[in-house]
Image (tube, helix red, strand yellow):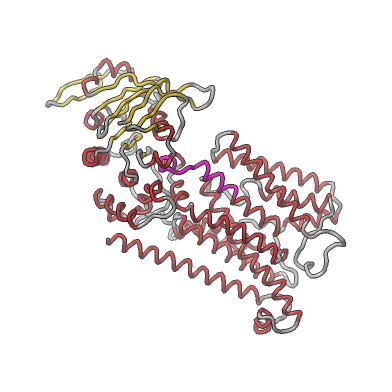
Amino acid sequence: MLKVEDLRFAYSKNGRPVLNGASLELKQGEVGILLGKNGSGKTTLFKNILGIEKPMKGKIRFEKDNLLKMSRRQRARRIAYVPQHIHFGDLSVMDSVLMGRVSRFGLKAGMEDYVAVEKILADMGLLEFATRSAEALSGGEKQKIAIARAMAQEPKLMVFDEPTGNLDIANEQLIVKEAKRLAREKNISILASLHDLNQALEFGDKFFFMKDGVIKYAGGKEIITEDVIKDIFEVDMAVREIDGRTVILPVI
Amino acid sequence: METLQKLKKINRRNTAVIILMVLAVLLAGILCLFVGSSGMTVQEGFQALLGNGTPAHIRIIQNIRLPRVLAAIIAGAGLAIAGLIMQTTLNNTMASPSTLGVSNAAVFGANLSIIAFAGGFLSTGNNLQSFDAGANPYATSVLAFVFAVVSVLLILGLCTLRSFSPNVVVLAGMAIGSVWTAATTILQFYATDVGLSAAVVWSFGDLGRATYRTDAIMAVVVLAGFVYFMLMAWRYNALLSGEATAKTMGVHVEALRFVSLLLSSMITAVCVSFLGVIGFVGIICPHVTKRLLGHDHRVTIPVSCLSGSLLLVLADTLSRSLGSGSALPVGAITSLLGAPFFIAIIFSRKGGHK
């Protein structure tokens, strides 16, 4: 279980605070979706959870461990990241995914690392790409390789920063489904930021609405109401039931 | 398992490239050993290498040419990996071994020694007889090295005070480098004709300054860097995915960058202090290697090294054959030889992996 408590952060000492006491809780195997306007602090919250930035105040616990006291390597074995902008350098797909295990093998990849990566690639249908250059692949394929790399870390939590931002509809569906399948099959928690509310509804178990550096609303599907959307995004949206599914539509 | 077979094939290809490069360097080294203005035949040269033949021949081969060829191999390798590691850790394709202003600082140190303290230095043509009465031939190298190290520590110190972002390092390096250059200009303005010409000649890279002792010092530093860089190969690969992502994979990016910059600058500092400025090796060799073989540091580190050695040995051979008696500055030859090749590689679509 991930437990974030009262996180405060600014990018410079006397700068504008970006996180103003953000708190959230996510159980093992749950898919949590972070929603909010641009600049509300979503990416910064992720960076703090991932250890890319260090919070000024607050606690981050994962299971029984204090994440803030952990070395980067220890943290990397628990939490993996799928960034928004993905690049690998001119490396083969195999090497790009193998790289995810650097926190496990240290200096030199062993046979068991190759076997583990081969299994992940086979599981995700990427084996045919193994020896191709990761940099030359399409956006959707790169995204899948980034997920494979995160899987290679054997994490308990995967953090996705706007995973569908640069993808077409078909690839969007593919990535969301793949992530959800992994969460279910391997009992991995997922924390993702998304812009599309309907996609969020389809993908998530738990929702966190962020505004001005705090999590203002948190809970299951039932918390997504017209009032909450109005408060967070400052735009009028209609929440409707169509064929037994909740759908969010713009009010024209 | 089929995938692992394919990977083994790629590994075999890379091993073959490395072995071929080693052979090429050895061959070029031998060629370089037997080319020169003394009119010695290859057979006489070979005899002299083994310690037979006339004393003059033995002296030329063992005391002049051999340390020179070794210097080319060591410095070429060192400058090329220093350039590669600078490019990776600063995430900047334009980075070179002296991005932290090392060369400018070394040039200033050398100028100070030559112009202000009338220091001597070893050079092609004068390492058989004692140079300028009483002047210590190592004074210039020592002062050049001291200033290079001071400059590196200054920049790395400044950068640790604030955040350690690559762009800040590059800009700080440029700024400090220009300060050294300005100081050099002022020094040269007040120099005598003789001092000025000696100082300018020093700044042309010259492998003829190498002795077994300087070769040994350079070899120790380059080897230390090479071992560290090879051990960190996977971490450099991780760094290609971006700093933030590398951190989430467990890489201590700040420490890696600090040690990498320090080691590559030290390599550059010793090479420049002993041999003068040899440009371009540190930029073209890593780029050509990456272009042809991809970015995997397990491959690019050794291959960059070998291509650096090869380029410098060939350039030195050429500089000694073209100069009719006195060798042309090898730094000019590396650019003359390397630049057209470099441009051809950059513009060829076939060469690129992308």
* Picture coordinates of residue B116, whole percent (x, y): 84, 49
* SS assignment for the magenta stretch, majority: helix
Where on the picture, by quarter, is residue B332? bottom right
Q: Measuring 56% from the left and 49% from the top, which residue is drawn there?
A: B86
Q: Is residue A140 above or below residue A198?
A: below
Span shown in magenta = B246-262
Horizontally, is B279 left or right of A45 in the view?
right
- Among all residues in the image, which is located at the extreme front? A64
Q: Is residue B319 above or below residue A110?
A: below
Count of residue discs: 0
* Picture coordinates of residue B324, whole percent (x, y): 73, 72
- Among all residues in the image, which is located at the extreme left? A243
Q: Is residue A153 above or below residue B340?
A: above
Q: Measuring 71% from the left and 41% from the top, which residue is drawn there?
A: B179
In the image, A229 versus B232, the foreground residue is B232
Q: Is residue A139 visible?
A: no
Residue B221 falls inside the magenta stretch: no
In the image, B18 versus B217, the foreground residue is B217
* Picture coordinates of residue A114, whole percent (x, y): 33, 55
Q: Measuring 31% from the left and 26% from the top, which residue is drawn there?
A: A25
Q: Measuring 30% from the left and 38% from the top, which residue is drawn there?
A: A156
Where on the picture, by quarter, is residue B319? bottom right
Quarter placement of the C terminus of chain A: top left
Horizontally, is B322 left or right of B126 in the view?
left
Q: In this view, does B333 lie above or below B118?
A: below
* Picture coordinates of residue B87, whole percent (x, y): 53, 49
Quarter placement of the N terminus of chain A: top left
